[in-house]
Image: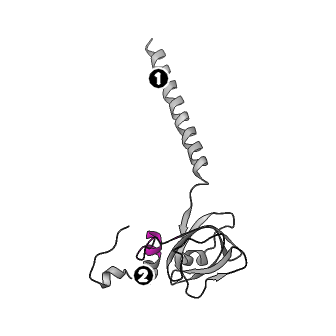
Amino acid sequence: MKSLKKTRRIQVIAVAAVALAVSTALIGYALQDGINFFRSPSEITAEAPPETEVFRLGGLVSEGSLVRGQGETITFSVTDGGATVPVEYTGVLPDLFEENQGMIGTGRYINGVFQASEILAKHDETYVPREVIEALEAQGVYRNPTDAAGGGAATN
């Protein structure tokens, strides 16, 4: 009698472990397309990602690089102070999109040009995305404007 209960308990534990492993694998597979990694221009120029990988690029829009083409195609460059990456976007830019301002784009790096499918811009005059600040600080380019005025670091 004891060995039957012990065998049944081991079977239940084994089935539960297999079910947990299968469900974890299915969740990971389902989420793999929804994960977009952030990269700075310096990281992209150091090691170009595969053309099939969708990721986020962030930095400052280089001054004088914004060119509006015919139709809805817009080209500009994004920099983190260490490297510059050309960006091509087809669509309507956000209202607050400007040169020398922070931005994050989602897309693919194809033939040396970041083909953006989505562009996000700052939401007020002091906002820069956290990932962009970290990348710019790593390059020694970013200086928080509130530090110069004696204020603390802005948290968003």
Q: Position of residue 76 (x, y in %)?
A: 62, 80
Residue at the spot 39% in from the left edge and 82% down from the top edge: 143
**What secondary structure is found at the residue carrying circle 2?**
loop
Residue at the spot 27% in from the left edge and 78% down from the top edge: 151
Residues at discs 2 and 1 in contact (Cβ within 8 Å): no
Asked if 13 appears above or below 86 in the picture, the reply is above
Q: Position of residue 28 (x, y in %)?
A: 57, 48
The image quadrant of residue 2 is top left
How packed mark 2 is, by other alpha carbons closer than 10 Å (few <14, some 14-19, many 20 or more), is some
Residue at the spot 44% in from the left edge and 84% down from the top edge: 141
Q: Quadrant of the N terminus?
A: top left
Q: Earlier in the sequence, mark 2 or mark 1?
A: 1
Q: Position of residue 139 (x, y in %)?
A: 46, 81
Query: Magenta segment range?
Result: 121-135
Tell whether position 134 is magenta: yes
Q: Quadrant of the C terminus?
A: bottom left
Judged from this view, the residue extending furthest toward the left is 150
User: 86 or 120: which is nearer to us?
Assistant: 120
Q: Which color scheme did the rendering employ for the protein?
A: one colour
Give me the disc on residue 142.
2
Give me the disc on residue 9.
1
Residue at the spot 49% in from the left edge and 79% down from the top edge: 101
Q: Amino acid at mark 2?
A: Tyr
**What secondary structure is found at the residue carrying circle 1?**
helix
How packed mark 1 is, by other alpha carbons closer than 10 Å (few <14, some 14-19, many 20 or more), is few
3D distance between C-alphas at marks 2 and 1:
60 Å
Say if residue 27 shows up in the picture: yes
